């Protein structure tokens, strides 16, 4: 036998002996694991996890090492080892089991999104039932509906996330439940309503008389009987509208007891009013009108389960989510969203410009519009925050001409004719919207301008220009002045007060008429029983659409046609 052949036989013999040693070590380590001696098993598996040409078990040893460490509560150690297996042995035929345990470890560590990402790679039918049980166990522990909504945004077909969200929403008081979302989940994932929606709809409580408390700055100490306009005239106008509505409702068999409290535009005076025992029996608080006085009313409202309608003219929803408070107006966010929906539905060309002012309100409306518009396929080609010193850029963008005719009239512009479908102006600032309207008029093309109802109070722009430039305004407070209800209201107001009703008197009347309707249909706890997403008809206006955000989603859009106002909206 040659020396070379002899060496090969020796090496082969040693390799076989070494392999037998590895098998013996692995068997011993496995026995320790099966006997639940996890610390000893980890120590025994550890040397086998190191790659060696003669070692056939590094993947398996690493796998069981990770399982043993997981059993001992060393989640980070187990996760690191499983990730190492994925990196070193990507084609290993047990990789689905590795992903299963990684999924569990991510769930254990509270990383729901990463857990579901790993789970999405598991296709082994033998693991699906266990995986479903795993998802249900951990997702049921998530009590935050917003987190579950984000999970469904990333994994829209994840049934267990839908089930968990329905369960969370189904535990909420009825007036906070998002009914449309719940119905979508039930239908999409075929979920059992009776098992997951656990809060029953409360029974309505009807009364002979409902108590409405007004907490407003009447400033009674400063009032005098002279006919001059008072510095808080708008408050007095709201009160006149409320009282006239109460008279009208009484004739319909709906009795309101109106309690008026003067909070003197003071947070301290507001707290003193709230200390009165009779406020606890109010069915709704109307007011106060200013943010600094709202906080104690909201705290009182929640502590005593009294409905509160803070500032009926406000679009600011600072108190959401609050179980007993709501807005009569649409929020700034809703104004932006509804405007985007209107553009998507009514404007054929889907390119859009957005201008907004420096206020927080303008930014909220604009960004809500942009987000929704992009979701609906409207392309926002340019958006600009306009300051006083930069307002000239509006005309520069819109009317800078590149071609002229022989009389020097513009034929073409830097922003080419008919390249835009719409311009959304999220501002009440006349400096901004007047430049947009004038620019569009100069261009003479087919751009539609979408703006705000406050523009109607500006006397510097003739309404005929709004008609020529196809201006449409989001107008939640639009009232058809030739409607029988408005004609009757105006007649009664003139008879009682000797003058035409103004904006705030009309608002006070409409709010109170709507409250009377809510009481009549749903009783004292109308917020709990009023179905979200179901339009409540208005008396003078277009009505109230309760949204989950506790504001009004009913927004008509108005424009001018042959000198008259016409409406269009989203049903």
Image (tube, helix red, strand yellow):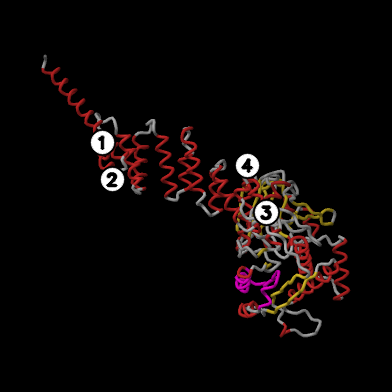
Which sits in the foreground, 400 or 536?
536
* Residue 271 location (% of width, % of height): 62, 78
Say few, some or many: other residues with alpha carbon within 10 Å of mark 1 (under 14 / 14 to 19 / 20 or more): some
Say few, some or many: other residues with alpha carbon within 10 Å of mark 2 (under 14 / 14 to 19 / 20 or more): some
- Identify the disc placed on residue 28: 1
* Residue drawn at 38 percent across, 33 percent down: 90
Tag 3 residue: 424
Mark nearer the viewer, 2 or 4 = 2
Say whether disc 1 or disc 2 marks the residue closer to the N-terminus: 1
Tag 4 residue: 188
Q: Secondary structure at mark 1?
A: helix
Q: Quadrant of the N terminus?
A: top left
Say whether disc 3 or disc 2 marks the residue closer to the N-terminus: 2
Q: Secondary structure at mark 2?
A: helix
Q: Is residue 284 magenta?
A: yes
Rounded to the nearest angstrom, the CA distance separating label 1 from label 2 is 13 Å
Mark nearer the viewer, 4 or 1 = 1
């Amino acid at each position: 036998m040659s020396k070379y052949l002899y060496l090969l036989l020796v090496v082969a013999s040693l390799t076989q002996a070494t392999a037998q040693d590895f098998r013996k070590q692995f068997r011993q380590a496995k026995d320790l694991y099966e006997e639940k001696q996890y610390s000893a098993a980890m120590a025994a598996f550890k040397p086998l996890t190191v790659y060696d040409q003669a070692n056939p078990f590094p993947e398996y040893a690493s796998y069981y090492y990770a399982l043993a460490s997981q059993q001992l509560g060393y989640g980070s150690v187990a996760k690191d080892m499983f990730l190492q297996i994925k990196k070193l042995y990507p084609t290993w035929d047990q990789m689905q089991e590795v992903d299963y345990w990684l999924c569990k470890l991510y769930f254990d560590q509270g990383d729901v999104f990463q857990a579901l990402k790993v789970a999405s790679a598991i296709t082994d039918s033998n693991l699906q039932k266990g995986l479903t049980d795993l998802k249900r166990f951990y997702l049921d522990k998530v009590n935050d509906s917003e987190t579950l909504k984000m999970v469904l945004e990333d994994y829209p077909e994840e049934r267990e996330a839908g089930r968990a969200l329905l369960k969370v929403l189904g535990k909420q008081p009825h007036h906070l439940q998002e009914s449309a979302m719940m119905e979508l989940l039930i239908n999409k994932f075929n979920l059992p309503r009776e098992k997951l929606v656990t809060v029953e709809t409360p029974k309505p409580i009807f009364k002979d008389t409902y108590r409405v408390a007004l907490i407003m700055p009447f400033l009674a100490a400063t009032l005098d009987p002279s006919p001059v306009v008072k510095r808080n005239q708008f408050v007095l106008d709201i009160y006149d509208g409320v009282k006239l509505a109460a008279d009208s409702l009484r004739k319909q068999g709906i009795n309101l007891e109106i309690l008026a409290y003067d909070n003197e535009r003071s947070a301290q005076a507001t707290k003193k009013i709230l200390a009165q025992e009779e406020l606890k029996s109010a069915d709704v608080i109307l007011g106060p009108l200013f943010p600094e006085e709202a906080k104690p009313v909201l705290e009182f409202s929640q502590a005593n389960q009294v409905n509160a309608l803070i500032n009926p003219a406000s679009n600011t929803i600072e108190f959401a989510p609050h179980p007993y408070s709501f807005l009569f107006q649409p929020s700034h966010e809703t104004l932006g969203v509804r405007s985007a929906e209107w553009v998507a539905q009514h404007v054929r060309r889907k390119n859009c410009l957005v201008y907004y002012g420096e206020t927080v309100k303008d930014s909220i409306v604009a960004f809500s519009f942009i987000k929704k518009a992009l979701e609906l396929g409207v392309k926002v080609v340019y958006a600009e925050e306009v300051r006083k010193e930069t307002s000239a850029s509006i005309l520069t963008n819109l009317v800078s001409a590149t071609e002229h005719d022989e009389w020097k009239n513009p034929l073409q512009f830097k922003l080419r004719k008919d390249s835009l479908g719409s311009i959304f102006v999220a501002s009440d600032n006349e400096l901004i919207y007047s430049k947009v309207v004038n620019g569009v008029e100069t261009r003479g093309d087919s751009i539609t301008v979408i703006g705000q109802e406050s523009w109607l109070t500006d006397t510097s722009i003739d309404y005929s220009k709004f008609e020529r430039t196809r201006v449409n305004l989001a107008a939640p407070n639009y009232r058809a002045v030739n409607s029988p209800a408005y004609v009757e209201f105006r007649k009664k107001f003139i008879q009682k007060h000797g003058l035409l009703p103004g904006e705030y008197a009309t608002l006070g009347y409409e709010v109170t008429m709507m409250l009377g309707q809510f009481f009549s249909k749903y009783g004292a706890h109308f917020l709990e029983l009023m179905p979200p997403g179901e339009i409540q008809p208005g008396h003078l206006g277009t009505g109230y659409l309760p949204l989950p955000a506790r504001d009004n989603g009913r927004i008509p859009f108005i424009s001018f046609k042959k000198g008259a106002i016409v409406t269009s909206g989203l049903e």
